[in-house]
Amino acid sequence: MKKQISGVTLETVQGDIASQEDIDAVVNAANARLMPGGGVAGAIHRAAGRGLAEECKPLVPIKPGDAVITGAHNLPNSHVIHCLGPVYGVDKPEDKLLRNCYKKALDLAEDNNIESIAFPAISTGAFGYPLKEATEIAVDTVAAEIPALKKVKLIRFVLFGKKELDVYEEIISKKL
Ligand code: AR6
């Protein structure tokens, strides 16, 4: 699905966040130590190579809701923006912390002249955030930021499974 909002393209695709070849910055659903893990972080670090973990070392730890930017090493992108989403039921208030992730990632993209950015569904895997609730927050936050964007022209939500893709498309159709 693809939509134009205030001159910015918002799209959804099913796929792997580590294979977004036409995107400047991919967002990592990171852990506080910015180390390889499972899910998105595992895929990003595997594809980026060990240089990414090395570059991350002086930047840790990060707090829930925070985001930091690095190079992308062997990934086909220019940057990785690492976001630490809230652990559902643990890091509170989880809705605000999740909103901060999307907002800070877009702020970092703007500050670094990034034109295209791809987000995974932060916090909805190992961190247990219910998918529909997290998707509402992702879509609302990104939509609210779009009118203020000057550099970013393409925002892509990359969903691993068909079920996640369907939820995103339903919520975007309803809201935007
Ligand atoms: N591409 C796109 N989406 C993916 C991929 C991929 N390659 N792999 C999984 N997903 P998660 P979190 C989906 O667990 O909940 C890690 O171990 C997945 O189906 O990656 O923020 C870190 O080290 C789910 O919908 O992120 C942290 O400790 C979504 O991406 C912790 O997990 C997020 O799942 C972060 O947990």
Image (cartoon, rainbow, N blue to C red):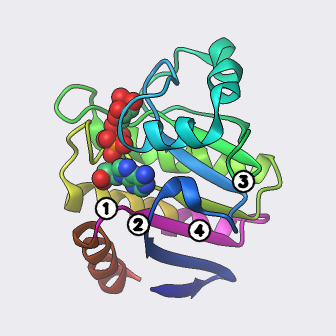
- Kindly identify which residue carries mark 2: 139
Q: Secondary structure at mark 4?
A: strand
What x and y, as percent, mark residue 115? 76, 64
- Kindly identify which residue carries mark 4: 155
Q: Are marks 2 and 1 in contact (CB under 8 Å)?
A: yes
Q: Are marks 1 and 3 in contact (CB under 8 Å)?
A: no
Quarter holding ligand 1: top left
In the displayed structure, does residue 111 sit left or right of residue 39? right
Q: Residues within 10 Å of mark 4 (few under 14, many from 20)?
A: many
- 89 and 164: which is toward the camera: 164
Q: Residues within 10 Å of mark 1 (few under 14, many from 20)?
A: many
Could you say which disc has been placed on residue 135 in the image?
Answer: 1
For marks 3 and 2, the one nearer the N-term is 3
User: Relative to 11, does residue 73 appear above or below in the rendering?
Assistant: above
User: Disc 1, ligand 1: is the CB inside 8 Å?
Assistant: no
Could you say which disc has been placed on residue 77 in the image?
Answer: 3
